[in-house]
Amino acid sequence: MVFEGYAKYVVYDEKRWDLLRRKRELALKLMHVLERCSIVSTVVHGSVARGDVEEDSDVDVSLLKPYSPGLLMLCLERGGYNVYSRKIVMPTPVHTPKLYIYLDPSEELVVSNPLAELSPVEVEFYKFSGMLELRELAKNLRVPGVNKELMLIEPTDYGHTEMPVLGNEDYVAKRLGISLATVKDRVEALSRRAREGHTGLFIEEEVPVGMDVEEFIKKLCRENKVFRERVQRHGLCI
């Protein structure tokens, strides 16, 4: 198979391996806390799953099934976590809204909870960036995925290789086990974000300090018809 662009070979030094271990330990601890609350549909995604972490890489743990926001907050607090901020995000009217909970002042560690059922395509978004379940992370596995610069990262024993997604969309879809349509969607979305920045989100609202997440969700239900239609079947607007 002939690839467009180039392949780059990246070798990690001990400092980078140590950084990866630290960030994976953060994810593993958080996922174990969630599991003890019977929240088992969790994944870590992005650079922590792939391995190509940097100092400012976020540790993104996501639930694949909607869970009660109040019970999730209680689970985290009982697990010893301090909640520093909470945010409701809905990128477009067709995307599932999510609750993001930031667990440190620098927002390095975050857990996200969908407020309605994710579509199969939205689950593929996580696979696009690379994702691991708890058991896979505990085995110290690494998986291929695409970074924000639209490079396919493939783990190796010495670090990783990377190659451009543009021009290689068919290979990327097959390598990641996702649809070609999802690859093209992510390429378009990340390219637009690179041009315009984090703009144009349909909903991006921080939950005020002192307000329960459920009360804030009810407020959004009253103010936004599209949001209400997406979450009301889960009893969040009552």
Image (cartoon, grey):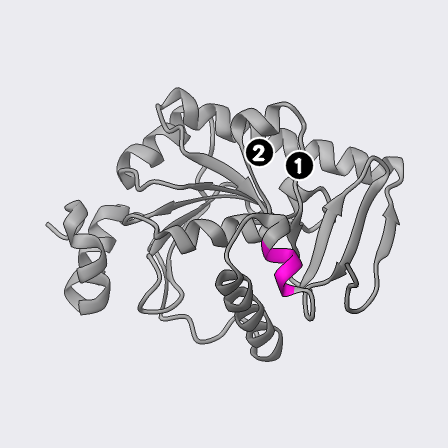
Residue 161 on image: x %, y % = 80, 50
Where residue 110 sits in the image (x, y, percent)? 50, 44
Relative to 208, does residue 224 appear above or below in the rendering?
Answer: below
**Image mark for residue 64:** none
Q: Which mark is residue 27?
A: 2
Above or below 96: residue 138: above
Q: Amino acid at mark 2?
A: Ala
For the residues labelled 1 and 2, say whether their Cβ atoms are less than 8 Å apart. Answer: yes
Residue at screen point 54% across, 68% down? 184
Q: Position of residue 198 (x, y in %)?
A: 52, 70
Question: Is residue 224 visible in this depiction of the protein?
Answer: no
Residue plotted at (36% across, 71% down)? 202
On the image, numbered disc 1 is attached to which residue? 23
Three-letter residue code for mark 1: Lys
* Horizontal side of residue 126 vs 53, given as left or right: left
**Separation (CA) of disc 1 from disc 2:** 6 Å
Secondary-structure class at tag 1:
helix
Magenta span: 169-173
Residue farthest along the left direction in this orientation: 238
Majority secondary structure of the magenta segment?
helix
**Residue 74: x percent and y percent?**
33, 31
Residues 100 and 209: in front is 100
